[in-house]
Amino acid sequence: GQSLEQPSEVTAVEGAIVQINCTYQTSGFYGLSWYQQHDGGAPTFLSYNALDGLEETGRFSSFLSRSDSYGYLLLQELQMKDSASYFCAVRPRGTALIFGKGTTLSVSS
Amino acid sequence: NAGVTQTPKFQVLKTGQSMTLQCAQDMNHEYMSWYRQDPGMGLRLIHYSVGAGITDQGEVPNGYNVSRSTTEDFPLRLLSAAPSQTSVYFCASSSGEGREKLFFGSGTQLSVL
């Protein structure tokens, strides 16, 4: 089977940097994805790491280490609008995307 | 482009009733999937499809049926609704080259009394 673990809540202040970790147990997968979901909205795609290493997209970066079964999403220069839930996800071989339970990020001024 | 369209947005059912949640996409995506979202449980995969005529079960398929007669449509059927199926349902699609990049519909909030 497969499971993904991420912290349930993270708090930070505007302008800060926050890292949301994701550890996983899966028998084989294609890569690690991250999604953002604001309250009452639908999830939206943020990033995808097919290979080990760091991927940067503006203020957001994502990292994957297959040897450590670990990845993270790094959010820099936090803004109030970054308050949302963040989900890591993997696509095990032979099935569709499986999501973690999500991390609620609260950004305060 | 409309993207992924789900109907209805809200629905209230009585226990034992059946209904179909509609999902349509206009991006010519091969892959479509259904998820349910419950508080503290994240998104759980119900059923998915890799193309017209092909469907498969996800993590929580019991009580749900799907079919994929066209590339565009992927309806989810609740056979006999139960209170445990009260949830927010999301349909998603992705292309063959970018299966990890899902495009989600706006969701259906379902309550079963």
Image (cartoon, rainbow, N blue to C red):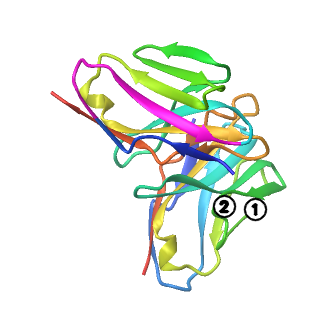
User: Is residue A55 something one can see in this rendering?
Assistant: yes
The residue under the point 65% across, 58% down is B59
The kind of residue on which mark 1 rests is Ser
Name the residue carrying label 2.
Answer: B75
Seen from the viewer's position, the closer of residues A23 and B111 is A23
Whether residue A75 appears in magenta in the rendering, the answer is no
Q: Secondary structure at mark 1?
A: loop
**Taking B4 as reference, is B67 left or right?**
right
Whether tag 2 and tag 1 are in contact, CB under 8 A, the answer is yes
Label 1: few (<14), some or many (≥20) within 10 Å?
A: some
Of the image marks 2 and 1, the number of the one nearer the N terminus: 1
Residue A62 percent location from the top left of the image: 51, 22
The kind of residue on which mark 2 rests is Pro
Q: Secondary structure at mark 2?
A: loop
Above-or-below relation of B16 to A15:
below
**Taking A105 as reference, is B29 left or right?**
right
The residue under the point 56% across, 43% down is A4
Q: CA distance from mark 2 to mark 1?
A: 6 Å
**Taking B34 as reference, is B30 left or right?**
right
User: Is residue B68 something one can see in this rendering?
Assistant: no
Whether residue A15 appears in magenta in the rendering, the answer is yes
Name the residue carrying label 1.
Answer: B67
Q: Which residues are magenta?
A: A11-26
